[in-house]
Image: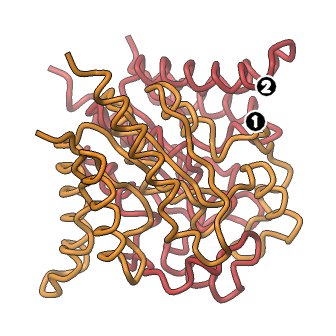
Chain colours: A red, B orange
Amino acid sequence: VSNRIYLAGPDVFLPDARDIAERKKAICSAHGLEGIFPADPEIKDRANLPAFEIARLISASNIGLMDSCDGLIANLTPFRGVSMDTGTAVEIGYMSSLGRPVLGYTNVAEPYRDRAVQYYAQGGKAIPESYSAGSAIEDFGFADNLMIEFAVRRCGGSIVVSRVAEGTELHDLRAFEACVAQARELLSAARP
Amino acid sequence: VSNRIYLAGPDVFLPDARDIAERKKAICSAHGLEGIFPADPEIKDRANLPAFEIARLISASNIGLMDSCDGLIANLTPFRGVSMDTGTAVEIGYMSSLGRPVLGYTNVAEPYRDRAVQYYAQGGKAIPESYSAGSAIEDFGFADNLMIEFAVRRCGGSIVVSRVAEGTELHDLRAFEACVAQARELLSAARP
């Protein structure tokens, strides 16, 4: 039986989410793993449901899928701000708490510190941000918040940071594939 | 013995983090709970340590503190982007996975959908965001990503949304106090 890997990320919000899901699953399969994509696309298609019920079902389904998986690979590419997608961050904490391998990749190579500095330099205009001016910016060279960095390091992995062609940040899967290889190695090492 | 509540949020990054910690702890205490602030400020003071070691210690300490707590109250106020702080999101997932009550508040009343629309309307200039243009924006009226909303709802709580005076978004603690009251109620209901 293949190990199951939960494929966390903002990929679910993209117009071609199903295509990305298939590509990620194929890469997992080529490495002897089973990729499990979040339930969002299927549930969103059930247009007969009220919006709140769709949201509730997505949350419950994704938790059930995580419970059924042996590890997680998160897309940490910044999403609508300085940081990665927050739903994905919740999922990292959830799987980390279960003691299962958590891996991650980003296709934006500038470290968190540089992105945050750039954010304030441009006035952080997109949302009212003036209230956080003067707050400390983590300066560890990490891809994102240290809780994410160490969720990955604790299980023996390392975040894969990749620089890709502009416009392909949410579609280039080379860094993802490097995470799949890490996952396979970690999970086969854990076997008796 | 008082129930212990982990006080998650970007508060740790503010210049007056220690003052906020004391104010939050006092509010918890007034409600018969013990507020546990993340270890960041103490560890950052140990300037003799290399940066990487400081980061590692903060992560390990905060996980130890979460393990020792009976619940969590998260500051969900948007931080450096459309969404809440990602380190806090990891902590929500972690405590949620342990089955302990997770509560949260935000001092920015505009729902996630409005903030994301505003972000794209202004060009999302702070970081290269063009690659996520056209991605679906959750439109449930929630404060943030649905995984956060339901982490709170699953334990019987509700996110407290507050509109505060401009400039006080990271310092007004009335919504926080409403979460403390929720935590006390949920934890006393759980007692034999």
> Label 1 crowding class (10 Å Cα cut-off): few <14, some 14-19, many 20+?
some
Dot 2 amino acid type: Ala
**Residue B91 position in % (x across, y down):** 37, 47
Residue closest to the eye, B39 or B166: B166
Q: Amino acid at mark 1?
A: Phe
* Residue A113 in the figure: left or right of residue B46: right
- Classify residue B23 by image quadrant: bottom left
Looking at the image, is A40 positioned above or below residue A145? above
Classify the position of the C terminus of chain B by image quarter.
top left
Who's the residue at 46% across and 65% down the image? A143
Spatial separation of the CA atoms under disc 2 and disc 1: 6 Å
Look at mark 1 in the image and give the residue it sits on: B140
Q: Which residue is mark 2?
A: A51
Host chain of mark 2: A
**Are the two marked residues, 2 and 1, in contact with CB atoms closer than 8 angstroms?**
yes
Q: Secondary structure at mark 1?
A: loop
Residue B19 quadrant: bottom left
Q: Residue at x 14, y 82 (%)?
A: B46
Foreground pick, A168 / B67: B67
Q: Nearer the viewer, residue A136 or B163?
A: B163
Residue A150 location (% of width, % of height): 30, 55
Farthest residue to the right: give it.
Answer: B121
Residue B171 at what x, y percent from top left?
49, 71
Q: Is residue B157 above or below residue B7?
A: above
Q: Chain of mark 1?
A: B
